[in-house]
Amino acid sequence: MLTGSPKSSYGLISYTTMTKLLLISLGVCVINISWAQVFTNKEVGKKNQALSDSLKIADYPYALPILGAKATKAGYSLPYSAGFSVQYFGTKSDLIINNLSVGFNNGPKYNLDGLVRFDKARATANAVTVRPDIWLLPFLNVYGIFGQSQASTDIGFGVWVPDSTGVEKKVLEASTVVKFKSTTFGLGVTPTIGVGGGFLALDFNVAWTDVPQLNKPARSFVFGPRFGKNFKLKKPDRTIAVWVGGFRVSIASGTNGSISLSDVIPEGGGEIGAKIDQGIQKVDDAQQQVDTWWAGLTPLEQNSPTNRARYQAANAALSRAGEILSAADAAVQTIATSTVQYSMEKQVKDHWNFIVGSQFQLNKHFMIRGEVGFLGSRNQGLLGVQYRFGL
């Protein structure tokens, strides 16, 4: 049965909690994208015969990559062995949330599956990252990732409860936009090879996004295969490259943490508070309908397995909603010192999308790169500069 005297913000609390987590998840997916198109290239063809011959007789002057001297003597042209890049990245993406639980002031957590449904979870993020890298081997690049992002997420949700017929109805509907900041660090490797200017690169990285509201940094994995062609221009060492490929994101599904209730509920409540009060009244009405329906059944009808199952399911859902509302109401009374604890499982809606990109190399030291990703529910764009040097 419905308990408590609800002047509560249950819907707003669960909703805002989810919003922040979506931002955290998106920050993870965004920041660890960090790859630059340079590669060891096997010089082939008559036009490049002189270059190939000069590589074979020249002394390789740097300590890295390991086996760099042997690679040049075999006719491979190597990029400078160390580099530093700065990138700006923007993206929009959809996420899917399951098994959401919320509790208050370190009390019991309430599972919201079946009660709260998300109509939309559209996240937008902008990030700036830096990436130092080295060529450990002629065909293996190793790099670090450091970055910060700003994000906003547009969430829409509804609270659903059953009526006397067993049909679930939406008793509350709301949406909002929340902003968030995060810091990310990670590591990556890129096996790559090029022959005659054509190249294949397989980028792998793992990153951790540090957010104050999480108990520990959130982890993500990225895999980005790319295939392309590098074209030499008239000036020495000046080239332009184009490529196509895929981009796959996987984020650790389990997330839990705690936030201050005063960060969740805006002062005064405003329009959302009015919607919540309307939703509470609808829950009361639904409980009365269930009770009236059950009282109007004959003893034989009440003993029907179908009717009994419907009655028990409706009471269980409405009772659970009442418990959550009461717990939220108690927390709201001491909002300045109250906290909200949460746990959830999350995943990106589309793990893969398609990417196309290009890089202009002014010389072997400076490069400018752009890339866009699309298809599915994730769109992204990147612009970066890179400086390379021998080590």
Image (cartoon, rainbow, N blue to C red):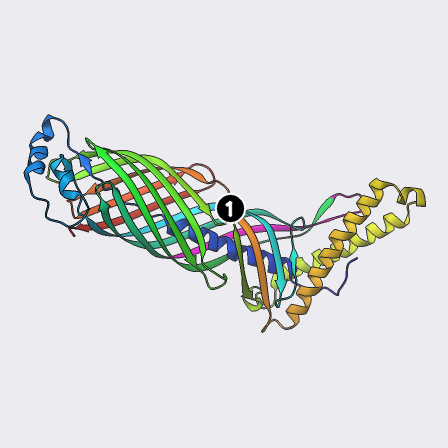
State the residue at coordinates (6%, 36%): 54
In which quadrant of the rendered image does the N terminus lie?
Answer: bottom right
State the residue at coordinates (9%, 34%): 51
Q: Is residue 150 magenta?
A: yes
Residue in the foreground of this view, choosing between 74 and 213: 74
Q: Would you say 233 lies left or right of 120 here? A: left
Above/below status of 108 relative to 26 = below
Q: Secondary structure at mark 1?
A: strand
Q: Which residue is outermost to the top?
A: 46
Q: Which residue is mark 1?
A: 347
Q: Main secondary structure of the magenta part?
A: strand
Q: Would you say 221 lies left or right of 39 here? A: right
Q: Would you say 86 lies left or right of 312 here? A: left
Residue 177 seen in the current view: no
Name the image quarter holding residue 340: bottom right
Q: Which residue is outermost to the right?
A: 299
Instruction: Give the x, y percent position of residue 354.
Output: 39, 36
Q: Is residue 245 magenta?
A: no
Above/below status of 306 relative to 149 = above
Residue in the foreground of this view, choosing between 4 and 252: 252
Residue 71 seen in the current view: yes
The boundaries of the magenta stretch are 148-167
How many numbered marks, from 0 up? 1
Instruction: Give the x, y percent position of residue 337.
Output: 59, 73
Q: Would you say 64 lies left or right of 181 here? A: left
Alpha-carbon neighbours of circle 1 within 10 Å: few (<14), some, or many (≥20)? Answer: many
Instruction: Give the x, y percent position of residue 254.
Output: 53, 52
Name the image quarter holding residue 147: bottom left
Instruction: Give the x, y percent position of residue 150.
Output: 41, 57
User: Amino acid under label 1?
Assistant: Gln
